[in-house]
Image (cartoon, helix red, strand yellow):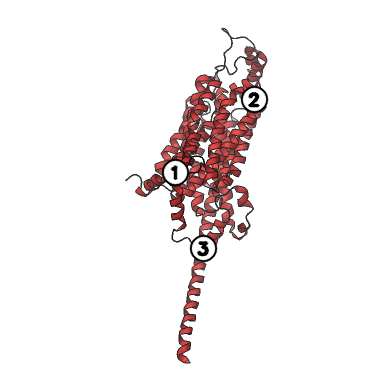
Amino acid sequence: MFVDERIVTLFKRNAHHTLTYWSVFFSFGLCIAFLGPTILDLQCQTQSTLSQITWVFFSQQFCLLIGSSIGGVFKRTLFSALAALFVSALTISVIFAIIPVCNNVLLLAIAMAVSGFAMGIIDTIANIQLVTIYQRDSAVFLQALHFFIGFGALVSPLIADPFLSETGCGNHTGNVTETMHHFRNMLRNSPIAEHNINQSLVPHEGGQEESNVHYAFWIMALINLPVPIAVLFLMYREQLIPCCPSGTPRLLDKDELAMENQPGAEGSEVEQKEHEAGGHGDIFSCCRNDNLRGLPISFFMIHILGGMVLFMTDGIVGAYAGFVYTYGVSPPMSLPHKTAGYLASIFWAAITAGRLLSIPLSYRFQPVRLLVFNLAGAIVTVLMLLIFYTSNSFLFAGTFLCGLFLSSIFPCMLAYTEDILDYQGCATSVLVTSAGMGEMVMQVVVGSIIQTEGSYSFLLCGMIIACLGFIFFIGLLLFHRMHRNYLTGTKKKSAMVEERAREQNGSAQTEQKQEPGSS
């Protein structure tokens, strides 16, 4: 059989929870991908410069990082987790609805900061809940979870594309149009900048084009509305809404009881300390826990190096999705704006397809093997894009391959590190926070480098970041081996201590039996 019956049984038992968490990640993907193709229209709407509109990316990613860092606080009860997911998903719909009325860059940045905070909470809670439910079988379900990010991120640019203005700016004055073209050509690093600026001051025949991008945001707000409704329905089924009692029993009660009564709950001393070191809590509670002092250095390095790998790889995802459109309209590519708009859609389509393909692959192959293959494939793809930097056709092919290889690194890394740490410790919170930080930092860094050094530096930055990620992954493999040896030695010592204790107890009982006979 293609899928183990045990996996199918687990899914059926937790189907309602799993499908709800997957749908919430669709909201996450919907919100993360629309900025890239709509950035020039939003720039004109807010009458801002390119350097100013770049901070909108930063505000979203910075608050996504904050939301990811504190999202673990809401996992303490099922009610708090689902309530946080409901409010976050509903917030995303509200933000989509109000983006068209944000007429200055500060209001837009605040709106994106709020959406980023909601996305961070969704990211942490959904990952933690699935890992908690499925434990060692979570790899397949995490791949499916992150497939829905790609699906939402694919839908978002496709909805926006028909409403994008062909010329970039809509019905603003020539001054704003001049500023936009000036910054475009700064990115292009082209000597024809002056010619383009002069052309921008000439009125178009037949009048200026009106931007209709606000319709795209309203459509996305409506598409996202079923997601908070689905979370609310799950709360109703779980009898978590006081005013709406339900006759069905709570789904997790039986599972929690079964987990509490599972045999072999006792572990070695180091495993118990790892469990006490915070579990799947928020990252701040993990860092301040006193029990961390008794753990080996390999325990900390697995968290750090796993986080650094995702800092780099998710940084590439954020930077590529955010600036591939800008790279496409710049020399030597100089693609038409509508054509370049498809690059983001192709990138997210590849991520979606890659995560869908990774669902059966994660069942057949260990996460570490998929990680090696994907990291190596990403490096080779970016290298080929650097070599064939003048080929328009290879830009589209390379964009697809890059998205395909990067697609499953996050869920594979999450499953791999959680498996190393026996699903104890703070791996989920640390990895989610590191990934959000990587997207935030790399978008700002790569955008600044493109503006100062030219469009070719876009791919060069991607190559350097990918190589650094692979180096950190090699370090992670080494510390995994150290941690495994440490656990093996600790278990042997514990077994010897238990054996000696049994021998001492046996000899003591023998002496007690002999004493009455001797008297």
User: In which quarter of the view is residue 191 placed?
Assistant: top right
Q: What's the CA distance linking mark 2 and mark 1?
A: 39 Å
Which circle's residue, 3 or 2, is located before the other in the chain? 2
Residue 501 circle label: none
Q: Between residues 454 and 104, which one lies in front from this camera angle?
A: 104
CA distance for labels 1 and 3: 28 Å
Percent of width and height locating residue 261: 45, 58
- Marks 2/1 in contact by CB < 8 Å: the verdict is no
**Element type at marker 1?**
helix
Q: Position of residue 415 (x, y in %)?
A: 48, 47
Q: Which of the numbered marks, if any, corresponds to residue 141?
A: 1
Considering only vertical position in the picture, is 67 above or below 295? above
| Residue shown at 48% from the left, 88% from the top | 515
Which of the two discs, 2 and 1, sits closer to the camera?
A: 1
Residue that badge 3 annotates: 268
For residue 305, side relative to residue 416 (left or right): right
- As drawn, is 399 to the left or to the right of 173? left
Which residue is drawn at the image coordinates 55% and 18% (left, top)?
Answer: 212
Q: Name the residue beneath numbered marker 2.
A: 50
Q: Residue furthest left?
A: 1
